[in-house]
Image (tube, helix red, strand yellow):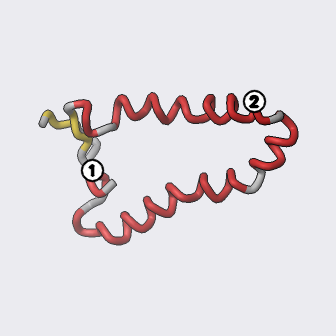
Amino acid sequence: MMTLCNPKFSATQFALLSSLMAVSRDLLASPAGAFKDALGWGNFFLMTIAAAVPGMLLLLVFAPWNGRSVQADGLESED
């Protein structure tokens, strides 16, 4: 996450980005019980898998093990 931050404002940007990561956890935890009650356990787990697939696919692009690194200015560099 620090590679996305400008070194001049790294503490502020890190705090904002880490807070943004936690938003989905906080927003989705409350209605999860209602989703489970409406869908049943099996369909609930299928729904969570379907919700996770886009993030997993984005890992193929942005993860550090793909040989490219995305810099703060949006340019890619070969390592």
Q: Residue at x 58, y 57 (%)?
A: 23
Name the secondary structure under disc 2: helix
Contact, mark 1 vs mark 2 (Cβ under 8 Å) = no
Residue 49: x %, y % from top left:
61, 31
> Residue furthest toward the front?
41
Sooner in the amino-acid sequence: mark 1 or mark 2: 2
Q: Residue at x 62, y 29 (%)?
A: 50
- Crowd rating for badge 2 (residues with CA inside 10 Å; few <14, some 14–19, many 20+): few
Where is residue 44, by image quadrant?
A: top right
- Crowd rating for badge 1 (residues with CA inside 10 Å; few <14, some 14–19, many 20+): some
Residue 70: x %, y % from top left:
26, 41
Quadrant containing the N terminus is bottom left
Left/right placement of residue 54 relative to residue 77 reads right
Q: CA distance from mark 1 to mark 2?
A: 41 Å
Q: Which dot, 1 or 2, sits closer to the camera? A: 2
The residue identified by callout 1 is 72
Name the secondary structure under disc 1: loop
Residue 42 is tagged as 2
Residue 10: x %, y % from top left:
29, 67
What's the residue type where badge 2 is placed?
Answer: Gly
Left/right placement of residue 46 relative to residue 17 reads right
Left/right placement of residue 27 relative to residue 75 reads right
Q: Is residue 23 above or below residue 32?
A: below
> Residue furthest toward the right?
38
Where is residue 15, by image quadrant?
A: bottom left
Q: Nearer the viewer, residue 63 or 33?
A: 33
Q: Nearer the viewer, residue 40 or 79?
A: 40
Q: Is residue 69 above or below residue 31?
A: above
Q: Residue at x 77, y 35 (%)?
A: 41
Quadrant containing the C terminus is top left
Q: Nearer the viewer, residue 79 or 43?
A: 43
